[in-house]
Amino acid sequence: MKKGYDKTIGYSPLEDVDENKLWQLIKINKKIIDQYCLPAKNDMILVAGAGSGQEAVLINKEFQLKTIGVDLNINQNDLSYNKSDLFLQKQDLASLAFSGDTFSLVYCYHVLEHVSDHLAVLREVHRVLKPGGVLFIGFPNKNRLISYIGTAQKVSSLDKIKWNLTDYLDRLRGRFENKYGAHAGFTEREFIEDASRIFDSISSVRKSYMLLKYTNLSMLIKLIISIKLEEFVFPSNYYICTKRM
């Protein structure tokens, strides 16, 4: 198993994803998305950064809508996933091969920290969204104190400790930035500043995500929110970004 950090896939190989954990995360995210977007039967979903394609398969199954998954890591010679309502394509997120106003929903889960030009990706996502369409996006919280606790990767507790130590070393060296290959992500302020140049409405759904994912810790999560420590305790940021009608 590869333990080092790879800019395009993160810390662990794509084949080391726990499918059940990934599906549970998709179920949580769908509950959030449903509050902002209820696509019609003929609408399409774009999974931007679908890894090897497994995520797009599960999203297609959960949403029951035509789904297209794109990623530079998709092997186009493997067509086993492709069917009438599911397609996997090898594409660069900064230069998508779709017409404008195509998708009602773009799903981009822990991908933005791996691209070389995140603004270009956000612009492309906005372009291919239909008017009134939404982007669901999540990425690491750059201000977090600890991370990797709820990862869908098949890894040990020791691996998670090592990854957190690597992050802290990068901080001390002044290299905790995506451009240096660190698993940094973005702060809330950084993302909102960039996304507000492109999208018409941006809503943070981080609190909802945490409460839905960790139902057994709801009292603690609410306490963290009430004393305004979520920017440092919550490991990731999640947003719904909308394109004007």
Image (tube, grey):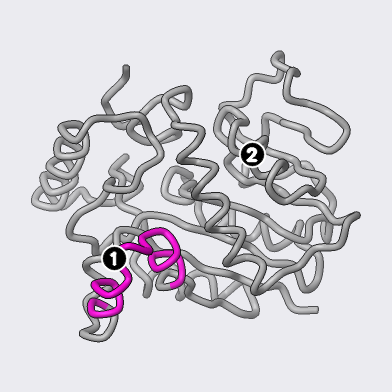
Kind of residue at badge 2: Leu
Q: SS of the residue at dot 1?
A: helix
Disc 2 to disc 1: CB gap under 8 Å? no
The residue segment tinted magenta is: 208-224
**x and y percent of residue 72 in the render?**
59, 30
The residues bearing labels 2 and 1 have C-alpha atoms spaced at a distance of: 26 Å
State left or right for residue 172 relative to residue 15.
left
Say which quarter of the image contains residue 132: bottom right
Q: Name the main secondary structure of what is drawn in magenta.
A: helix
> Which numbered tag is attached to residue 217?
1
Q: SS of the residue at dot 2?
A: helix
* Quarter of the image where the C terminus is located: bottom right
**x and y percent of residue 193 in the render?**
45, 75
**x and y percent of residue 104 in the render?**
78, 61
> What residue is shown at x 72% (from left), y 31% (from top)?
88
Kind of residue at badge 1: Leu
Say which quarter of the image contains residue 129: bottom right
Nearest to the eye among marks 2 and 1: give it. 1
> What residue is shown at x 80% (from left), y 63% (from top)?
39
Q: Is residue 35 above or below residue 71?
A: below
**x and y percent of residue 238 in the render?**
46, 64
State left or right for residue 171 relative to residue 10.
left
Q: How crowded is mark 2: few (under 14 residues within 10 Å), some or many (20 or more)?
A: some
> Residue 218 lies in magenta, yes or no?
yes
> Residue 142 lies in magenta, yes or no?
no
Q: Which residue has dot 2 on it?
A: 58
> What residue is shown at x 48% (from left), y 44% (from top)?
115
Q: Earlier in the sequence, mark 2 or mark 1?
A: 2
Q: Is residue 45 above or below residue 143?
A: above
